[in-house]
Image: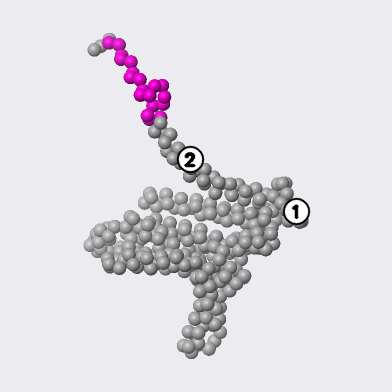
Amino acid sequence: MAGAALAPEAPVEGGSGASPRTRRSWVPLVLLLPATVSLGFTVGYPLIWLLRTSFSVQLADGVISGQLTSGVYSAVLDSGFYWKVVLTTVELGGIVTGCTLALTYPLALFLLRTGSRWRGVLIALAVAPMLTSTVVRSYGWLMILNNQGLIDTLLRNLGYHGTPPALDDNFTGTVIGLVEVLMPYAVLAMLSGFGRLDSELERAAASLGASRLQVWRRVTLPLSLPGVLTAGLLVFVLSISAFVTPDILGGGRVFVLATEVYDDATVSLNWPQAAVLSVFILVLFAIVGLIYQRASRLLSRT
């Protein structure tokens, strides 16, 4: 009724405590607290320690003093050798990523589209190499690619008497090994990223007179690009940080950031320089991540 006094608000249950809405807003924060603390100790603290070490001064007896300096960064950036190492690392990552995507894309499409009752078995076989150690697989490739290995023996049995191609202890062997090692990761990334693919759209394009190549180029490929992009990011990051395969198949002749970090930390015991090179790897990760985010946004608008 007009002019009637407004009734006082009913008191919140529980006295003068916070409202249920306020309490509910704190629940996610409380649930996230254990994971946040865990990440802080396992990820945040090591990163802070790494950055602190990269600016440290190492004395002649190997002891790291408490002084801070940017001299190690200057020495690394002024070294032509380490610039070559960075370029080799990026080149290796780019070639391995391109080869892996080219070989994995048709395989992932087949596994996605096949109606065979053995589809689950085929997917399991495609990712089964992940159950084997990278060390074992790299040594297996070493036995295949060396000058007395399977390929050399096969060429000689076929009547080839020339000098066989050098496939071990070099950049080529490293690329071959990394492509095989990282293909299962690419298969999983593509299968999880092909959610936008719709066979109905492909059939509609074919019914309108499009050839198979046109259907793939204008329908299948654009819809599958998010999965390809995710697989490319994963493969590139894993390849530029790989140590075991470049060390075994490179034969000490392929210098990448991961192998140099290992040598500085365990052979020459130059921890500040190893930390600086590790920071370079993290910078590469950040650059690739930014490129990935930009490309994902462009794809989402199409």
Is 5 one of the magenta-colored residues? Answer: yes
The quarter of the picture where residue 169 lies is bottom right
Report the disc number at residue 33: 2
- The structure residue drawn at horizontal position 76% and vertical position 56%, both measured from the top left corner, is 61
Which of pointers 2 and 1 lies earlier in the amino acid sequence? 2
**Which quarter of the figure has residue 117?**
bottom left
Instruction: Report the side of 179 relative to 106 (left or right).
Output: right
Does residue 172 appear in this view? no
Q: Is residue 138 visible?
A: yes
Kind of residue at badge 1 = Leu
Q: Main secondary structure of the magenta part?
A: loop
Q: Residue 219, how many percent across, how many down?
A: 32, 59
User: Residue drawn 27% across and 58% down?
Assistant: 201
Residue 165, horizontal then vertical, whole percent: 54, 80
Q: What span is colored magenta in the figure?
A: 4-22
What colour scheme has been applied to the protein in the rendered image? one colour
Q: Front-most of 166 and 301?
A: 166
Identified by mark 2, the residue type is: Leu
Give the crowd class for mark 2: few <14, some 14-19, many >=20 residues within 10 Å: few
Residue 59, disc = 1
Among all residues in the image, which is located at the extreme top? 3
